[in-house]
Amino acid sequence: MCERCGLDIIHPDDDRFRLSITRRRSLDMLAAGGLAALGTMLGGFGQSAMAADDDVVRIGYLPITDATALLVAHGMGFFKEEGLESEKPTLIRGWSPLVESFAAGKFNLVHLLKPIPVWMRYNNKFPVKIMAWAHTNGSGVIVGGHTNVKSFKDLGGKQIAVPFWYSMHNIVLQYALRQSGVKPVIKSQTETLAPDECNLQVMGPPDMPAALAAKKIDGYIVAEPFNAMGELKAGGRMLRFTGDIWKNHPCCVICMHEEVTTKKPEWTQKVMNAIVRAEVYASQNKKEVAKLLSKDGGGYLPMPAPVVERAMTYYDHAFYDKEGAIKHDDWKIGRIDFQPWPYPSATKMIVKAMNDTVVSGDTTFLKSLDPEFVAKDLVNYDFVRKAMDKHPEWKKDPSVNPADPFAREEMLAL
Protein backbone atom coordinates (compact mmCIF):
# COMPACT_ATOMS: atom_id res chain seq x y z
CA MET A 1 0.00 0.00 0.00
CA CYS A 2 1.24 3.48 -0.83
CA GLU A 3 1.87 5.35 2.42
CA ARG A 4 1.09 8.69 0.82
CA CYS A 5 -2.19 7.97 -0.94
CA GLY A 6 -3.43 4.87 0.91
CA LEU A 7 -4.01 2.94 -2.32
CA ASP A 8 -2.73 -0.52 -3.17
CA ILE A 9 0.50 -0.80 -5.18
CA ILE A 10 1.36 -4.30 -6.38
CA HIS A 11 5.04 -5.25 -6.65
CA PRO A 12 6.17 -6.31 -10.16
CA ASP A 13 7.29 -9.71 -8.84
CA ASP A 14 3.82 -10.43 -7.48
CA ASP A 15 1.62 -12.75 -9.58
CA ARG A 16 -1.19 -10.26 -9.07
CA PHE A 17 0.90 -7.70 -10.95
CA ARG A 18 1.19 -9.96 -14.01
CA LEU A 19 -2.56 -10.66 -13.89
CA SER A 20 -3.24 -6.94 -13.51
CA ILE A 21 -1.04 -6.10 -16.49
CA THR A 22 -2.75 -8.76 -18.62
CA ARG A 23 -6.12 -7.31 -17.67
CA ARG A 24 -4.85 -3.76 -18.24
CA ARG A 25 -3.52 -4.61 -21.70
CA SER A 26 -6.87 -6.14 -22.54
CA LEU A 27 -8.72 -3.04 -21.38
CA ASP A 28 -6.25 -0.72 -23.06
CA MET A 29 -6.88 -2.58 -26.31
CA LEU A 30 -10.57 -1.96 -25.77
CA ALA A 31 -9.84 1.71 -25.14
CA ALA A 32 -7.75 2.07 -28.24
CA GLY A 33 -10.32 3.37 -30.67
CA GLY A 34 -10.31 0.89 -33.55
CA LEU A 35 -10.86 -1.73 -30.89
CA ALA A 36 -11.20 -4.95 -32.75
CA ALA A 37 -12.39 -6.76 -29.64
CA LEU A 38 -14.98 -4.31 -28.43
CA GLY A 39 -15.88 -3.28 -31.94
CA THR A 40 -16.73 -6.87 -32.78
CA MET A 41 -18.70 -7.24 -29.58
CA LEU A 42 -20.70 -4.06 -30.10
CA GLY A 43 -21.41 -4.98 -33.68
CA GLY A 44 -22.61 -8.39 -32.57
CA PHE A 45 -25.44 -7.12 -30.38
CA GLY A 46 -28.78 -6.75 -32.09
CA GLN A 47 -32.18 -5.57 -30.94
CA SER A 48 -31.99 -7.59 -27.72
CA ALA A 49 -28.79 -5.86 -26.64
CA MET A 50 -30.31 -3.97 -23.73
CA ALA A 51 -30.87 -4.42 -20.02
CA ALA A 52 -33.64 -6.75 -18.94
CA ASP A 53 -37.06 -5.89 -20.32
CA ASP A 54 -38.51 -5.18 -16.89
CA ASP A 55 -38.74 -1.65 -15.54
CA VAL A 56 -35.99 -1.82 -12.94
CA VAL A 57 -33.43 0.98 -13.21
CA ARG A 58 -30.00 -0.65 -13.42
CA ILE A 59 -27.08 1.76 -13.16
CA GLY A 60 -23.41 1.24 -13.87
CA TYR A 61 -20.93 3.94 -12.87
CA LEU A 62 -17.31 4.79 -12.23
CA PRO A 63 -16.34 6.04 -8.75
CA ILE A 64 -16.17 9.68 -9.85
CA THR A 65 -18.28 12.75 -9.23
CA ASP A 66 -19.40 12.61 -12.88
CA ALA A 67 -21.88 9.97 -11.67
CA THR A 68 -23.44 12.33 -9.12
CA ALA A 69 -26.82 12.70 -10.84
CA LEU A 70 -27.30 8.93 -11.07
CA LEU A 71 -26.20 8.35 -7.47
CA VAL A 72 -28.22 11.21 -6.00
CA ALA A 73 -31.34 10.10 -7.88
CA HIS A 74 -30.90 6.70 -6.24
CA GLY A 75 -29.68 7.84 -2.83
CA MET A 76 -32.30 10.56 -2.35
CA GLY A 77 -35.13 8.32 -3.50
CA PHE A 78 -35.97 10.37 -6.59
CA PHE A 79 -36.43 7.26 -8.74
CA LYS A 80 -38.76 5.83 -6.10
CA GLU A 81 -40.79 9.04 -6.00
CA GLU A 82 -41.26 8.70 -9.76
CA GLY A 83 -42.71 5.24 -9.14
CA LEU A 84 -39.59 3.40 -10.32
CA GLU A 85 -37.75 0.49 -8.77
CA SER A 86 -33.97 0.89 -8.89
CA GLU A 87 -31.22 -1.50 -7.95
CA LYS A 88 -28.24 -0.25 -5.99
CA PRO A 89 -25.84 1.23 -8.59
CA THR A 90 -22.91 -1.00 -9.55
CA LEU A 91 -19.41 0.47 -9.25
CA ILE A 92 -17.09 -0.29 -12.18
CA ARG A 93 -13.38 0.59 -12.05
CA GLY A 94 -12.72 1.50 -15.69
CA TRP A 95 -14.37 2.84 -18.83
CA SER A 96 -13.83 -0.22 -20.99
CA PRO A 97 -15.61 -2.66 -18.65
CA LEU A 98 -18.44 -0.14 -18.18
CA VAL A 99 -18.89 0.14 -21.94
CA GLU A 100 -18.75 -3.66 -22.22
CA SER A 101 -21.40 -4.09 -19.53
CA PHE A 102 -23.70 -1.48 -21.03
CA ALA A 103 -23.35 -3.04 -24.49
CA ALA A 104 -24.06 -6.49 -23.04
CA GLY A 105 -27.29 -5.25 -21.47
CA LYS A 106 -26.26 -5.44 -17.82
CA PHE A 107 -27.17 -1.76 -17.31
CA ASN A 108 -29.92 0.37 -18.82
CA LEU A 109 -28.64 3.68 -17.45
CA VAL A 110 -24.99 4.79 -17.42
CA HIS A 111 -22.78 7.83 -17.55
CA LEU A 112 -20.14 7.85 -20.30
CA LEU A 113 -17.44 10.27 -21.35
CA LYS A 114 -19.12 12.26 -24.10
CA PRO A 115 -16.82 11.19 -26.97
CA ILE A 116 -17.51 7.50 -26.18
CA PRO A 117 -21.11 7.53 -27.51
CA VAL A 118 -19.83 9.24 -30.67
CA TRP A 119 -17.42 6.37 -31.21
CA MET A 120 -19.98 3.70 -30.23
CA ARG A 121 -22.77 4.95 -32.49
CA TYR A 122 -20.79 5.88 -35.59
CA ASN A 123 -17.79 3.57 -35.50
CA ASN A 124 -19.44 0.46 -34.05
CA LYS A 125 -23.06 1.12 -35.05
CA PHE A 126 -24.28 0.62 -31.49
CA PRO A 127 -27.62 2.41 -30.89
CA VAL A 128 -26.63 4.49 -27.88
CA LYS A 129 -28.39 7.78 -27.17
CA ILE A 130 -27.21 10.72 -25.10
CA MET A 131 -30.12 11.72 -22.89
CA ALA A 132 -28.63 14.63 -20.90
CA TRP A 133 -25.39 16.04 -19.60
CA ALA A 134 -24.39 14.52 -16.28
CA HIS A 135 -22.52 17.65 -15.15
CA THR A 136 -20.19 20.40 -16.32
CA ASN A 137 -16.53 21.02 -15.43
CA GLY A 138 -15.35 18.66 -12.65
CA SER A 139 -11.91 17.66 -13.95
CA GLY A 140 -8.33 18.88 -13.78
CA VAL A 141 -4.70 18.24 -14.64
CA ILE A 142 -2.60 17.06 -11.69
CA VAL A 143 1.21 17.01 -11.80
CA GLY A 144 3.53 15.28 -9.36
CA GLY A 145 5.53 17.06 -6.70
CA HIS A 146 8.59 15.28 -8.08
CA THR A 147 8.33 17.28 -11.32
CA ASN A 148 9.21 20.88 -12.11
CA VAL A 149 6.07 21.38 -14.20
CA LYS A 150 4.62 24.88 -13.93
CA SER A 151 2.81 25.10 -17.26
CA PHE A 152 1.68 22.91 -20.15
CA LYS A 153 4.88 23.82 -21.97
CA ASP A 154 6.79 21.99 -19.23
CA LEU A 155 4.98 18.72 -20.07
CA GLY A 156 7.45 18.12 -22.90
CA GLY A 157 9.32 14.90 -22.13
CA LYS A 158 6.76 13.86 -19.51
CA GLN A 159 4.47 10.85 -19.05
CA ILE A 160 0.80 11.79 -18.58
CA ALA A 161 -2.16 9.49 -18.01
CA VAL A 162 -5.62 10.00 -19.49
CA PRO A 163 -8.70 7.97 -18.49
CA PHE A 164 -9.70 6.95 -22.04
CA TRP A 165 -8.66 7.86 -25.56
CA TYR A 166 -12.20 8.94 -26.37
CA SER A 167 -12.59 11.41 -23.52
CA MET A 168 -13.04 15.12 -22.96
CA HIS A 169 -9.84 14.87 -20.96
CA ASN A 170 -7.82 13.77 -23.96
CA ILE A 171 -9.39 16.48 -26.13
CA VAL A 172 -8.79 19.33 -23.65
CA LEU A 173 -5.29 18.14 -22.69
CA GLN A 174 -4.16 17.89 -26.30
CA TYR A 175 -5.62 21.31 -27.09
CA ALA A 176 -3.58 22.79 -24.22
CA LEU A 177 -0.44 20.93 -25.32
CA ARG A 178 -0.73 22.11 -28.92
CA GLN A 179 -1.34 25.68 -27.81
CA SER A 180 1.85 25.42 -25.73
CA GLY A 181 4.02 24.03 -28.52
CA VAL A 182 4.08 20.47 -27.17
CA LYS A 183 3.30 17.46 -29.37
CA PRO A 184 1.06 14.75 -27.88
CA VAL A 185 2.34 11.26 -28.74
CA ILE A 186 1.53 7.66 -27.87
CA LYS A 187 4.69 5.63 -27.32
CA SER A 188 5.98 2.90 -25.08
CA GLN A 189 7.14 4.29 -21.75
CA THR A 190 10.59 2.90 -22.52
CA GLU A 191 10.93 4.93 -25.74
CA THR A 192 12.92 8.15 -25.73
CA LEU A 193 10.84 11.31 -25.93
CA ALA A 194 11.85 14.47 -27.73
CA PRO A 195 11.92 17.56 -25.52
CA ASP A 196 8.68 18.79 -27.13
CA GLU A 197 6.81 15.45 -26.91
CA CYS A 198 4.36 14.52 -24.16
CA ASN A 199 3.64 10.81 -23.96
CA LEU A 200 0.07 9.74 -23.19
CA GLN A 201 -1.22 6.48 -21.79
CA VAL A 202 -4.65 5.22 -20.77
CA MET A 203 -5.08 4.49 -17.08
CA GLY A 204 -8.15 3.82 -14.97
CA PRO A 205 -9.01 6.79 -12.72
CA PRO A 206 -8.69 4.78 -9.46
CA ASP A 207 -5.12 3.83 -10.41
CA MET A 208 -3.87 7.34 -11.10
CA PRO A 209 -3.09 8.72 -7.60
CA ALA A 210 -1.07 5.63 -6.65
CA ALA A 211 0.85 5.75 -9.94
CA LEU A 212 1.64 9.42 -9.35
CA ALA A 213 2.72 8.83 -5.76
CA ALA A 214 4.99 6.01 -6.97
CA LYS A 215 6.41 8.34 -9.68
CA LYS A 216 5.35 5.94 -12.43
CA ILE A 217 3.79 8.92 -14.21
CA ASP A 218 4.44 12.64 -14.08
CA GLY A 219 0.82 13.67 -14.04
CA TYR A 220 -2.71 12.86 -15.05
CA ILE A 221 -5.94 14.44 -16.22
CA VAL A 222 -9.11 12.98 -14.77
CA ALA A 223 -12.48 13.59 -13.17
CA GLU A 224 -12.96 14.30 -9.49
CA PRO A 225 -12.48 13.19 -6.79
CA PHE A 226 -9.17 11.79 -8.07
CA ASN A 227 -7.77 15.30 -8.51
CA ALA A 228 -8.59 16.07 -4.88
CA MET A 229 -7.12 12.69 -3.93
CA GLY A 230 -3.98 13.55 -5.87
CA GLU A 231 -3.67 16.87 -4.08
CA LEU A 232 -4.35 15.56 -0.59
CA LYS A 233 -2.81 12.08 -0.66
CA ALA A 234 -0.40 11.66 -3.57
CA GLY A 235 1.81 14.75 -3.42
CA GLY A 236 0.17 16.22 -6.52
CA ARG A 237 -0.49 19.82 -7.51
CA MET A 238 -3.32 21.16 -9.65
CA LEU A 239 -1.81 22.45 -12.89
CA ARG A 240 -5.13 23.62 -14.38
CA PHE A 241 -8.84 23.04 -14.03
CA THR A 242 -10.35 21.89 -17.32
CA GLY A 243 -13.37 24.14 -16.80
CA ASP A 244 -10.94 27.06 -16.81
CA ILE A 245 -9.88 26.05 -20.34
CA TRP A 246 -13.30 25.21 -21.79
CA LYS A 247 -15.92 27.14 -19.90
CA ASN A 248 -18.63 24.91 -18.43
CA HIS A 249 -17.63 22.03 -20.68
CA PRO A 250 -19.54 18.76 -20.71
CA CYS A 251 -17.65 15.67 -19.64
CA CYS A 252 -19.84 12.70 -18.79
CA VAL A 253 -23.30 12.34 -20.28
CA ILE A 254 -26.31 10.25 -19.32
CA CYS A 255 -26.81 7.43 -21.82
CA MET A 256 -29.45 4.83 -22.66
CA HIS A 257 -30.03 2.24 -25.34
CA GLU A 258 -32.12 3.84 -28.11
CA GLU A 259 -34.60 0.95 -28.19
CA VAL A 260 -35.42 1.46 -24.52
CA THR A 261 -36.34 5.09 -25.18
CA THR A 262 -38.63 4.19 -28.07
CA LYS A 263 -40.30 1.14 -26.51
CA LYS A 264 -40.69 2.58 -23.00
CA PRO A 265 -41.23 6.33 -23.33
CA GLU A 266 -43.17 6.71 -20.06
CA TRP A 267 -40.48 4.84 -18.11
CA THR A 268 -37.77 6.86 -19.85
CA GLN A 269 -39.48 10.13 -18.94
CA LYS A 270 -39.71 9.14 -15.29
CA VAL A 271 -36.01 8.26 -15.27
CA MET A 272 -35.12 11.62 -16.78
CA ASN A 273 -37.37 13.46 -14.33
CA ALA A 274 -35.39 11.91 -11.48
CA ILE A 275 -32.05 12.69 -13.15
CA VAL A 276 -32.84 16.36 -13.75
CA ARG A 277 -34.18 16.71 -10.22
CA ALA A 278 -30.96 15.17 -8.91
CA GLU A 279 -28.83 17.64 -10.87
CA VAL A 280 -30.80 20.59 -9.54
CA TYR A 281 -30.44 19.21 -6.02
CA ALA A 282 -26.72 18.58 -6.41
CA SER A 283 -26.10 22.10 -7.74
CA GLN A 284 -27.80 23.57 -4.67
CA ASN A 285 -26.40 21.20 -2.02
CA LYS A 286 -22.83 20.30 -3.00
CA LYS A 287 -21.50 19.80 0.53
CA GLU A 288 -24.40 17.58 1.56
CA VAL A 289 -24.15 15.62 -1.67
CA ALA A 290 -20.42 15.12 -1.12
CA LYS A 291 -21.17 13.48 2.21
CA LEU A 292 -23.87 11.30 0.62
CA LEU A 293 -21.49 10.09 -2.09
CA SER A 294 -18.53 9.44 0.23
CA LYS A 295 -17.73 6.24 2.08
CA ASP A 296 -18.70 8.12 5.25
CA GLY A 297 -22.22 8.59 3.90
CA GLY A 298 -23.96 6.53 1.25
CA GLY A 299 -20.78 4.71 0.31
CA TYR A 300 -21.07 5.21 -3.44
CA LEU A 301 -17.46 6.43 -3.72
CA PRO A 302 -14.57 4.75 -1.87
CA MET A 303 -13.19 8.07 -0.58
CA PRO A 304 -13.71 9.82 2.75
CA ALA A 305 -15.98 12.85 2.96
CA PRO A 306 -13.16 15.47 3.16
CA VAL A 307 -11.76 14.31 -0.20
CA VAL A 308 -15.15 14.30 -1.93
CA GLU A 309 -16.10 17.62 -0.36
CA ARG A 310 -12.92 19.21 -1.68
CA ALA A 311 -13.69 17.77 -5.11
CA MET A 312 -17.20 19.23 -5.05
CA THR A 313 -16.64 22.60 -3.41
CA TYR A 314 -13.01 23.77 -3.14
CA TYR A 315 -12.33 26.35 -5.86
CA ASP A 316 -10.45 28.97 -3.88
CA HIS A 317 -9.35 31.71 -6.25
CA ALA A 318 -6.75 33.18 -3.91
CA PHE A 319 -5.00 29.82 -3.70
CA TYR A 320 -5.46 28.52 -7.24
CA ASP A 321 -4.82 31.85 -8.98
CA LYS A 322 -1.42 31.92 -7.29
CA GLU A 323 -0.80 28.32 -8.41
CA GLY A 324 -1.83 29.17 -11.98
CA ALA A 325 -4.65 26.60 -11.96
CA ILE A 326 -7.26 29.33 -12.53
CA LYS A 327 -6.69 32.05 -15.12
CA HIS A 328 -10.26 33.03 -15.99
CA ASP A 329 -11.71 34.39 -12.77
CA ASP A 330 -14.41 36.21 -14.74
CA TRP A 331 -15.91 32.91 -15.92
CA LYS A 332 -17.44 32.40 -12.46
CA ILE A 333 -17.63 28.61 -12.60
CA GLY A 334 -17.46 26.01 -9.85
CA ARG A 335 -15.05 23.14 -9.42
CA ILE A 336 -17.93 20.98 -10.62
CA ASP A 337 -21.37 22.14 -11.70
CA PHE A 338 -24.60 20.44 -12.71
CA GLN A 339 -26.60 21.50 -15.74
CA PRO A 340 -28.48 18.81 -17.68
CA TRP A 341 -29.24 20.50 -21.02
CA PRO A 342 -27.10 18.96 -23.82
CA TYR A 343 -26.18 22.07 -25.79
CA PRO A 344 -25.86 21.20 -29.51
CA SER A 345 -23.02 23.71 -29.89
CA ALA A 346 -20.83 21.62 -27.57
CA THR A 347 -21.56 18.39 -29.44
CA LYS A 348 -20.57 20.01 -32.73
CA MET A 349 -17.37 21.31 -31.18
CA ILE A 350 -16.50 17.88 -29.79
CA VAL A 351 -16.97 16.15 -33.16
CA LYS A 352 -14.66 18.68 -34.79
CA ALA A 353 -12.10 18.43 -31.98
CA MET A 354 -12.00 14.63 -32.14
CA ASN A 355 -10.48 14.89 -35.61
CA ASP A 356 -7.55 16.82 -34.14
CA THR A 357 -7.03 14.49 -31.16
CA VAL A 358 -4.39 11.75 -31.17
CA VAL A 359 -5.74 8.35 -30.13
CA SER A 360 -4.61 4.76 -30.47
CA GLY A 361 -6.57 2.98 -33.19
CA ASP A 362 -8.33 3.72 -36.45
CA THR A 363 -10.18 7.05 -36.55
CA THR A 364 -11.33 6.86 -40.16
CA PHE A 365 -14.98 7.01 -39.13
CA LEU A 366 -14.48 10.55 -37.80
CA LYS A 367 -13.59 11.95 -41.21
CA SER A 368 -17.09 11.50 -42.60
CA LEU A 369 -18.98 12.73 -39.54
CA ASP A 370 -21.03 15.89 -40.02
CA PRO A 371 -21.16 17.78 -36.70
CA GLU A 372 -24.64 19.13 -37.47
CA PHE A 373 -25.95 15.63 -38.13
CA VAL A 374 -24.35 14.18 -34.99
CA ALA A 375 -25.84 16.92 -32.82
CA LYS A 376 -29.31 15.99 -34.07
CA ASP A 377 -28.90 12.21 -34.31
CA LEU A 378 -26.84 11.28 -31.24
CA VAL A 379 -28.80 13.26 -28.65
CA ASN A 380 -32.42 12.85 -27.60
CA TYR A 381 -33.59 16.29 -26.46
CA ASP A 382 -37.27 15.49 -25.84
CA PHE A 383 -37.19 13.68 -22.50
CA VAL A 384 -34.67 15.99 -20.83
CA ARG A 385 -36.56 19.07 -22.06
CA LYS A 386 -39.80 17.83 -20.48
CA ALA A 387 -37.97 16.97 -17.26
CA MET A 388 -36.42 20.44 -17.18
CA ASP A 389 -39.88 21.96 -17.64
CA LYS A 390 -40.95 19.97 -14.58
CA HIS A 391 -37.94 21.18 -12.59
CA PRO A 392 -37.34 24.74 -13.86
CA GLU A 393 -34.89 25.59 -11.06
CA TRP A 394 -32.08 24.63 -13.45
CA LYS A 395 -32.49 28.06 -15.07
CA LYS A 396 -31.05 29.67 -11.92
CA ASP A 397 -27.63 28.27 -12.80
CA PRO A 398 -25.36 31.25 -13.57
CA SER A 399 -24.13 29.52 -16.73
CA VAL A 400 -27.62 29.66 -18.23
CA ASN A 401 -28.58 32.62 -20.41
CA PRO A 402 -32.08 33.67 -19.23
CA ALA A 403 -32.85 35.20 -22.62
CA ASP A 404 -32.09 31.95 -24.49
CA PRO A 405 -31.48 29.10 -22.01
CA PHE A 406 -31.25 26.37 -24.65
CA ALA A 407 -28.39 27.88 -26.65
CA ARG A 408 -24.92 29.13 -25.82
CA GLU A 409 -21.58 30.13 -27.32
CA GLU A 410 -18.65 27.81 -26.57
CA MET A 411 -15.63 29.44 -24.93
CA LEU A 412 -12.25 27.70 -25.23
CA ALA A 413 -9.10 29.55 -24.18
CA LEU A 414 -5.80 28.56 -22.60
Image (cartoon, rainbow, N blue to C red):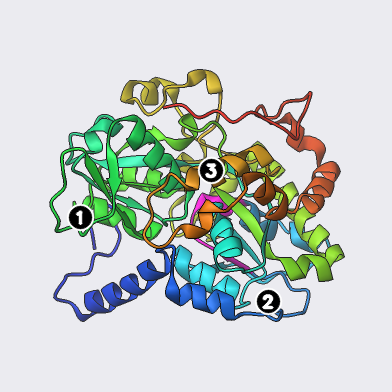
Amino acid carrying label 3: it is Lys
Q: Is residue 217 part of the magenta span, yes or no?
A: no
The span picked out in magenta is 59-68
Q: In the rendered image, is residue 9 in sight?
A: yes
Which residue is drawn at the image coordinates 47% and 21% (left, top)? 328
Residue 256 place in picture, x, y as percent: 68, 64
Tell me the distance, in whole angstroms, between the alpha carbons under discs 3 and 2: 32 Å
Looking at the rendered structure, the number of numbered marks drawn on it comes to 3
- The reply to whether discs 1 and 2 touch (Cβ–Cβ < 8 Å) is no
Tell me the distance, in whole angstroms, between the alpha carbons under discs 3 and 1: 33 Å
- Specify which label sits upstream in the sequence, 1 or 2: 2
Tell me the distance, in whole angstroms, between the alpha carbons under discs 1 and 2: 38 Å
Q: Label 2, secondary structure: give it.
A: loop
Which residue was labeled with disc 1?
216
Q: Which mark is residue 352?
A: 3
Amino acid carrying label 2: it is Ala
Q: Which mark is residue 151?
A: none
- The reply to whether discs 3 and 2 touch (Cβ–Cβ < 8 Å) is no
Q: Quadrant of the C terminus?
A: top left
Of labels 3 and 1, the one closer to you: 3
- The reply to whether discs 3 and 1 touch (Cβ–Cβ < 8 Å) is no
Residue 180 place in picture, x, y as percent: 31, 30
